[in-house]
Every structure is written in C-alpha cells, then in structure tokens.
Image (spheres, rainbow, N blue to C red):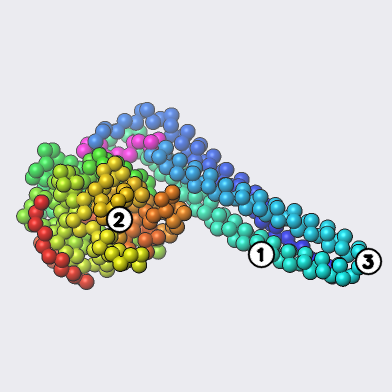
C-alpha cells in the first residue's frame, strides 16, 4: 500500500519563516521612525499644563516612545508564537520523514502482515500529524492577519508622526486656533455668540483661573462641554491620581485627539450652577454602529470626596444603562456590585473602590469603580474590539473600553465621548429620550 505524505508541514514551515521576516521588518520600521524624529525633539518645547496655554502635540518623541514598547511587546509575543509553531512544524516534518522511511523499509519486508500492520499504524500517525499541521496553519494565518494589522498601524503612526513633526516646527500661536469668546461653560459660550466647534477658554464660578476645553456646538445654539474623548488609542489612560485630577492627553481644534479633561475641572463645571447638567455618553463600535446614553443631574464631587460620581437617573438612550450595573451571571449580586452611581474615583495609587483588591490596578486605569464595573470608558484600547482574558494581561480581568449593556465585557469600543450640557437645553437637541428609568433625586455634595 503506497503512503502519500502530506506537504502541509513544508508549507507551514516556509510560511512561518516568511512571517518571522515580516515581523522583524515591522519592528525595524518602528525603531527607524523613532530615531528619525528624535533629533528634532529638543527644539520643540510645548508649554507645561494640560489645557491651559499651548494644546499642541509637540511631544512627538515622547508620544512614540510610549507607543513603541507596546508594539514591540506585541510583536515579540507574535515572534515567540511563530517560533513555537515553526519548531513544532519542523518536528512534525521530521516525524513524517521518519515514517516515510519506515514505510519503505516495511515494504521491503518479506512478511506482508507486518507490512500491513506497520503501514496502518503509520497512516494513523500521518493523519494525526496532518490534522496538527492544519491546525498550525490556521494559527499562522491568524498571526499573519495580526502582523498585517500591526504593519498597517505602524505606517499610520509614521505618517501621523511626520505630520505632527511639521506642525511642531511652527510657532504655537500660529498652529492653535483658540476662539475669543469665553464663559463659565460651553453653553454659556454659545449663549454669548460662540457658534463654531473648537477650543475655548472657560472659567467656572469657583475656578481660580480659566482653562481650555473643547466645545461642541450645533446650529440650534447648543454648547456641549466635552469631558473625554477616545479615538484611536494614541493616549495612554493608565495613569495615577494626579494626571486624572489635572487632565491629560491633547486638546485639538479639529477634535481628532484623545484626552481626559481632568476630575478637578469636571467638579468645577458641574457644581457651579442651579441648573443641573445632563451627561451624554456616545460610543462607536468597530462595526461603525453608534449608540448613546444620557444621565440627568450629573455631578463630580470635590477631591475631598474622591471626585464621587453622582447623577439622579438614567434619562434615556439606545446604549442601555450600564451605570446601573449588569448581571454577568457570575454572582447573584453582579448588578449591585457593578453599578456606578455614588462611587468614588479610583486609580492604581488611590484605591477608593468597594473591592477587597484594587480594581484600577487590575484594569489598568482610573474610573468610578465599584467591585468593579459594568461601564469603563477609560479602559485599555484594543484594536478590532474583541479581546480575551489572556490578552488582558497577568490579572486576566475585562479591562477594555466597556459598556456591558451594549456589547459584552470582552469587547472594547472604538470611540467614546463624554460631554455635558444644561438639562434645560435637552428640548432643543432634536432627539427623543428612550427607556427612561427614574432613580430618585440625589442632593448636592
């Protein structure tokens, strides 16, 4: 009985080597991009203080330096997996060669029963190894897709860096367009004639000095004060208490950058008026779908109360009410333990949650944690959305950009926005609120 040896092993081995070469090319591209811009970094000097004077992105080298280790780590992991698959494939190929030689020797044997038995056993072995090789090929295809995605991302980053480098060679006042109208919030700015979305200085009633914000304006005279943006994962949200207090990221006049306005600024804005604010959370998933959730009488408490999150009730929206918690099916108390109303803000160095451990350390970023969350808009940015416990790192917890009443906790959103507007403007927005759930009023801090 002639034995046909499958050629999957040779194909898999060659494909693994090709992907390893490609991975090294991506790594070199990242290193080369960093060295290209490093020489001009000293001549680029942004002024200190997030959202105060010079909201440019002149720290290009620092920006790439933060992103490069993440890419290198991902690529090193891919290289390790590819080498493992390559080694296993090589071993399978050697085993197949051995069985083929054994089959030739058995065929020359004078005992036909021995030949048939050995041939049958070797065929079983070959089929088993063929299945293993096919499985390895499937893994290689997936790794190929991941490397292609990383390569595309590196090319985008390289182009972004070149654009930023050109921008930073110009004086700050020539590159940043800050509108001249000011007010106590963006609605006040709109009331005073501000009609263009962009950067404005505002000074809440209790603020010692004005600070810069992005105002989102519409044709009906509404002015949203934007508190948070997630766009592309370019800003690291894994920060300690002080950056979350003061704000971080980049404010840009064209609204293309990521930032956290700052807990202290959020407190100053939301605690200044007798007219309560509505918090709107807007999200986009990786399929391009958009949903939102509104919360009435939104406030952020003072630092003495760890910037506690307070709202009166879920006003509506098609994204569901994740702030009210979610039943994941792990524990009867899931919904209670993952609700957010009344929770203090936690970071890795300020543990204010209700959990025995530290939710912010496990999930890698600051948020209004309970034990721990059903909503987490400051989570880790995952390309493509879906991720696993293994990808989540050593803790293995759901640490993505999560809104559990829309997508599962193992799905990370592509874009998010947190913005506020006085509640008396809601009638002019042209959107109906849905799924309203009254939760009772909560008093001022």
Name the secondary structure under disc 1.
Answer: helix
The disc, 2 or 3, on the residue closer to the chain's N-terminal end is 3
Question: Dividing the image into 4 quarters, which one contains the N terminus?
Answer: bottom right
User: Real-space Cα distance between discs 2 and 3?
Assistant: 72 Å
User: Relative to residue 174, is residue 73 drawn left or right?
Assistant: right
Any part of residue 85 in sight: yes
**Observer-nearest residue: 275 or 322?**
322
The disc, 2 or 1, on the residue closer to the chain's N-terminal end is 1
- Is the residue marked by circle 2 packed among few (<14), some (14-19), or many (20+) residues within 10 Å? many
**Observer-nearest residue: 109 or 97?**
109
Q: Is residue 425 magenta?
A: no
- Identify the residue at image location x=6%, y=55%: 274
The percent coordinates of residue 119 (x first, y second) are 81, 67
| Predominant SS along the magenta part | loop
**Which residue is tagged 3?**
110
Any part of residue 256 in sight: no
Give the image quarter of residue 177: top left
- Is the residue marked by circle 3 packed among few (<14), some (14-19), or many (20+) residues within 10 Å? few
**Which residue is tagged 1?**
131
Give the image quarter of residue 141: bottom right
**Of the residues tagged 3 and 1, which is closer to the observer?**
3
What label does residue 87 carry, if any? none
**Which residue is tagged 2?**
372
- Identify the residue at image location x=35%, y=67%: 329
- Identify the residue at image location x=15%, y=43%: 304
User: Real-space Cα distance between discs 3 and 1?
Assistant: 32 Å
Name the secondary structure under disc 2.
Answer: loop
The percent coordinates of residue 277 (x first, y second) are 14, 57
- Looking at the rendering, the stretch of residues picked out in magenta corresponds to 52-62
User: Real-space Cα distance between discs 2 and 1?
Assistant: 42 Å
């Amino acid at each position: 009985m002639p034995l046909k040896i499958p050629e999957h092993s040779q194909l898999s081995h060659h494909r693994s080597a090709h992907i390893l070469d490609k991975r090294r090319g991506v790594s070199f591209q990242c290193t080369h991009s960093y060295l290209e811009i490093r020489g001009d970094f000293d001549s680029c000097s942004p002024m200190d203080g997030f959202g105060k004077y010079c909201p440019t992105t002149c720290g290009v080298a620092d920006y790439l330096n933060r992103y490069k280790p993440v890419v290198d780590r991902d690529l090193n992991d891919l290289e390790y997996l590819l080498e493992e698959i390559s080694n296993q494939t090589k071993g399978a190929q050697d085993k197949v060669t051995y069985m083929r030689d054994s089959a030739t020797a058995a065929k020359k044997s004078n005992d036909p029963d021995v030949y048939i038995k050995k041939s049958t056993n070797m065929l079983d072995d070959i089929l088993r190894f063929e299945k293993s090789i096919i499985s390895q090929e499937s893994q290689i295809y997936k790794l190929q897709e991941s490397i292609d995605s990383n390569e595309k991302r590196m090319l985008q980053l390289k182009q972004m860096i070149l654009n930023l480098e050109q921008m930073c060679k110009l004086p700050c006042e020539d590159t940043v367009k800050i509108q001249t109208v000011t007010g106590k919030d963006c609605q006040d700015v709109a009331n005073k004639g501000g009609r263009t979305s962009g950067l404005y200085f505002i000074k809440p009633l209790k603020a010692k000095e004005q600070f810069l914000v992005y105002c989102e304006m519409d044709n009906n005279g509404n002015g949203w004060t934007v508190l948070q943006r997630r766009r592309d994962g370019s800003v690291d949200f894994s920060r300690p208490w002080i950056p979350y207090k003061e704000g971080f990221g980049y404010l840009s006049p064209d609204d293309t950058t990521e930032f956290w306005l700052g807990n202290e600024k959020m407190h100053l804005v939301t605690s200044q008026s007798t007219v309560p604010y509505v918090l709107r959370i807007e999200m986009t998933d990786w399929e391009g779908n958009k949903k939102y959730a509104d919360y009435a009488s939104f406030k952020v408490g003072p630092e003495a109360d760890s910037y506690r999150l307070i709202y009166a009730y879920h006003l509506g929206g098609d994204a569901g009410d994740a702030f009210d918690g979610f039943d994941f099916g792990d524990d009867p108390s899931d919904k209670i333990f993952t609700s957010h109303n009344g929770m203090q803000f936690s970071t890795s160095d300020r543990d204010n949650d209700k959990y025995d451990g530290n939710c912010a350390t496990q999930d890698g970023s600051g948020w209004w944690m309970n034990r721990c969350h059903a909503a987490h808009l400051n989570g880790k940015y995952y390309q493509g959305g879906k991720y696993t416990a293994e990808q989540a790192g050593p803790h293995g917890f759901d640490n993505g950009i999560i809104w559990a009443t829309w997508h599962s906790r193992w799905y990370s959103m592509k874009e998010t926005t947190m913005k506020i507007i006085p509640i008396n403007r809601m009638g002019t927005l042209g959107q109906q609120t849905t799924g309203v759930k009254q939760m009772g009023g909560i008093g001022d801090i």
